């Protein structure tokens, strides 16, 4: 018997997701929490198979950059971290049915604004197999069905994780089709997914600029964007030296391949000898490449010249750009021009300068005296996350279970009719 064509396969996937979403929407918070717990347990039970699949993906990924290989790599410890993330999602308050507002009109009508599921979500992502588990669990927790399309580099790993998630759903008595994946790494499947307007309620792309640009250009389904993370840390004139050294090393080098890694440093002009010199020396000594403007190059022969392109680059490597600015206003203007509106930080002991920065930056997350690597839903108390939304509609910042919801109004009367 001939294999169904791609359009037919995708249509069947969508039909099953729609049916599953209808079931999930009627479940209790306790049922969905139990299902996510069962998914976590199934992940742990399937750890050997998942790690074997990941080894196969890693073997095929020899040509990837070190940052991308780091994103792809699963270890027993990382996989346990993923399972713990699902445990945390299970323990979160039920996001559905929450009454956000309620009031009564003079005519006696009673109004409630409540959270409801979005329905069916399509999630397109690249070489991060953990997203398969995070996204599946967050969607189930929020009463949504999901169709996942991971990167070809993580196809085996994501497939093994998906098998475990579906086993957990089955054990919990919920439809396995609440979590499905596009059955092929063929890029043409993305094009089909983006036209499934009768099935999908929203598409969430998570990846590089080229992926986001394609989805934004081609999608006929509403898009919740997760853009690249060209994140900044600004060392203000009133920064504490030891805080600055500790924060910059963590923000840049804790994990260079995450979207919250600092990619560009700004230093107030008067800090060049006192703060910039030791901070940049720490980075250079730790093996980080620094690309700086002329004033900073003069500090150390190892600092390479920065170009205009560097100010807008997300490296995802042990590389950072560095520039001298004159005050908070210039720092804010530079970041708002070159940043990706993701995550920015100021290091200062001056409360007024901090407030100016926090209020002036047009990004989803803005921090004072904290590492940009806190750009993570788990660190916000949201459990795992789908991604960091850099858009301004529906949700901005870390997208957790409560953000994968819409609202509806429940209106109760007593034979109430409208006059006139």
Image: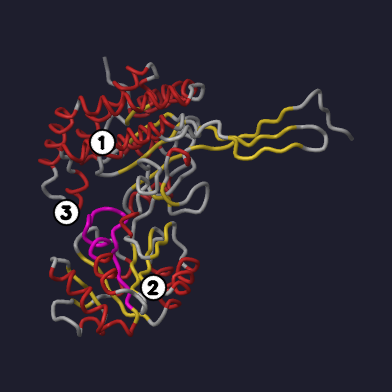
- Which of 19 and 192 lies nearest the eye of the viewer? 19
Mark in front: 3 vs 1: 3
Residue 181 placed where, x, y %?
32, 30
The residue wearing badge 1 is 185
Whichever of callouts 1 and 2 sits on the residue coming sooner in the sequence is: 1
How busy is the neighbourhood of tag 1: few (under 14 within 10 Å), some, or many (20 plus)?
A: some
Whichever of callouts 3 and 1 sits on the residue coming sooner in the sequence is: 3
88 versus 168 height, above or below = below
Q: In the shown orientation, is residue 76 left or right of residue 21?
A: left
SS of the residue under disc 1: loop
**Could you give the CA–CA distance between mark 1 and mark 2, rounded to whole angstroms?**
50 Å
Residues rendered magenta in the picture? 249-267
Mark in front: 2 vs 3: 2
How busy is the neighbourhood of tag 3: few (under 14 within 10 Å), some, or many (20 plus)?
A: few
SS of the residue under disc 3: loop
Residue 359 placed where, x, y %?
50, 66
SS of the residue under disc 2: loop
The residue wearing badge 2 is 349
Residue placed at 27% from the left, 39% from the top? Answer: 130
Residue 259 drawn in magenta: yes
Check residue 246 in the rendering and tell me which mark sits there, or answer none. Answer: none
Q: In the shown orientation, is residue 415 left or right of residue 25?
A: right
**Could you give the CA–CA distance between mark 2 and mark 3, rounded to whole angstroms?**
38 Å
Residue 184 drawn in magenta: no
84 versus 414 height, above or below = below
Where residue 245 sits, quadrant-wise, is: bottom left
Residue 411 placed where, x, y %?
70, 30
Residue placed at 16% from the left, 27% from the top? Answer: 49
The residue wearing badge 3 is 65
């Amino acid at each position: 018997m001939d294999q169904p064509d791609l359009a037919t396969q995708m249509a069947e996937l969508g039909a099953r997701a729609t049916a599953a979403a209808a079931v999930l929407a009627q479940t209790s918070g306790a049922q969905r929490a139990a299902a996510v717990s069962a998914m976590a347990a199934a992940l742990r039970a399937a750890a050997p198979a998942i790690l074997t699949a990941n080894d196969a993906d890693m073997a095929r990924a020899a040509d990837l950059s070190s940052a991308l290989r780091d994103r792809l790599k699963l270890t027993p410890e990382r996989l346990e971290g993923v399972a713990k993330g699902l445990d945390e999602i299970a323990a979160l308050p039920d996001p559905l049915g929450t009454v956000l507002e309620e009031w009564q009109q003079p005519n006696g009508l009673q109004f409630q604004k409540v959270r409801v599921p979005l329905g069916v979500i399509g999630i397109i992502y690249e070489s991060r197999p953990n997203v398969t588990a995070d996204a599946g669990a967050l969607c189930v927790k929020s009463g949504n069905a999901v169709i996942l399309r991971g990167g070809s580099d993580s196809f085996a790993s994501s497939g093994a994780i998906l098998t475990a998630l579906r086993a957990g759903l089955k054990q919990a008595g919920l439809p396995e089709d609440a979590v499905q994946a596009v059955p092929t790494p063929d890029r043409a499947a993305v094009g089909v997914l983006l036209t499934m307007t009768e099935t999908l309620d929203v598409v969430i792309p998570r990846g590089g600029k080229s992926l986001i640009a394609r989805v934004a250009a081609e999608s006929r389904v509403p898009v919740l964007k997760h853009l690249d993370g060209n994140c900044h840390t600004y060392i203000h004139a009133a920064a504490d030296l030891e805080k600055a050294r500790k924060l910059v090393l963590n923000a840049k080098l804790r994990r260079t391949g995450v979207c919250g890694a600092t990619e560009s440093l700004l230093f107030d002009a008067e800090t060049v000898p006192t703060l910039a010199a030791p901070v940049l020396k720490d980075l250079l000594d730790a093996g980080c490449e620094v690309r700086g403007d002329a004033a900073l190059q003069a500090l150390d022969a190892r600092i390479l010249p920065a170009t205009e392109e560097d100010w807008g680059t997300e490296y995802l490597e042990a590389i950072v750009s560095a520039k001298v600015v004159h005050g908070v206003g210039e720092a804010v203007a530079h970041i708002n021009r070159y940043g990706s509106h993701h995550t920015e930080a100021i290091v200062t002991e001056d409360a007024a300068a901090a407030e100016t920065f926090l209020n002036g930056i047009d990004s989803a997350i803005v921090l004072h005296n904290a590492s940009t690597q806190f750009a993570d839903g788990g660190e916000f108390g949201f459990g795992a996350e789908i991604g960091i939304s850099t858009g301004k509609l529906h949700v901005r910042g870390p997208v957790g279970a409560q953000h994968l919801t819409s609202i509806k109004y429940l209106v109760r009367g007593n034979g109430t009719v409208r006059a006139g």
